[in-house]
Amino acid sequence: TVAHTLEVSKRPEDLQLVAAAAKGDLGQVEAALQKAVVEAHVRLPGFLRATTALHAASSAGAVAVVQRLLEARSAVAGGHGQLRALTPLHDAGTEEVALLLMAARANPWANDPREPDPAWYHEQRHRHGIAQLIRQRRSEAAVEESLPSSASQAALVLPLSSQELQSVRSSFLAKGSAILELCELDPESAECSICMVEMVAEDDVLCLPCGASPSSEQKSGCRPHAFHLKCLEKWLLTKAGACPICRHSLRGKRKTRSAPARTREIAIPSLQSVQLQPLQPLAQPLLPLQPLSRVPVAKPRTRSAR
């Protein structure tokens, strides 16, 4: 197995930020945020793996520091650079930190195949209260997903899992050339709403069903909800499992397949219309079976010992 690799920062500013977050010192965190990169991975002395400031503050149970890092747009779904990916929710040391992270759209399910189930992970470390909060958030999310469309758009749509993302990718993957032809858009007006970069014909894009699509009948007066593949994958895994434009949920959405072509019907006569002919006697009687004669088998020669 190949470990997931990422760049580990050695800048003093980044080291100072993560060290201050691990101690829960809000004043030092405020000072370090002026020059440090909030999502930088650093390896502190005495630690075996690289970590981020949000991971360190979550593990320390520093609610005020976690709140400040979330305000600084720290990635709530970011993982450690190791074989077993852990999010800040896995490292939550107190129930208050876990509630704060889930309020910031931390996914209570596992995003990555390398990522353990958050509730199970806390149960193994005897943090039963946090595990119960995660299960409760899952139940609330299931109720929100079952609300009517007008209410579900306003409700929180959690990020997709890797399996759900694979289903979306296989259902709505298209080429940029198909998006450029759709609605007769020129290259200047066809751009990804996430990165604000114009699409080209060779780009791999995801065209969501909530907007116009190459397979829809309406070809004018509409705009597709299309994004670069890499841009939308990051959005669906870390931000929300919904369209960035209209917030339409993509959980469980798949492309409807067209009906199979009709095969040529072959007329099969019924049994009532078939007239059976009586059996005719044989012209010559069958000969009786003769017993098999035994054929002598020659014994193999054995070489005599001299």
Image (cartoon, helix red, strand yellow):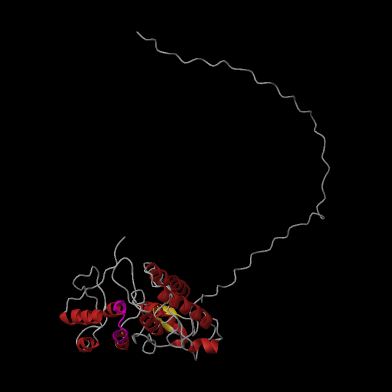
Q: Nearer the viewer, residue 110 or 29?
A: 29
Give percent across and percent down for residue 112: 38, 70
- In the image, taking residue 37 as reference, residue 174 lies left or right, namely right
Quadrant of the frame with the N terminus: bottom left
Inspect the magenta stretch and tell me whether residue 259 lies in it.
no
The dominant secondary structure in magenta is: helix
- In the image, taking residue 6 as reference, residue 219 lies left or right, namely right
Figure quadrant of residue 55? bottom left
Q: Nearer the viewer, residue 158 or 271?
A: 158
Quadrant of the frame with the C terminus: top left
Residue span colored magenta:
58-65
Q: Residue at x 80, y 31 (%)?
A: 283
Give percent across and percent down for residue 171: 48, 73
Figure quadrant of residue 303? top left
Number of numbered discs visible in the structure rendering: 0
Q: Farthest residue in the bottom direction?
A: 221
Inspect the magenta stretch and tell me whether residue 63 lies in it.
yes
- In the image, taking residue 207 as reference, residue 59 lies left or right, namely left
Is residue 112 in view? no
Give percent across and percent down for residue 115: 37, 69
Q: Farthest residue in the top direction?
A: 306
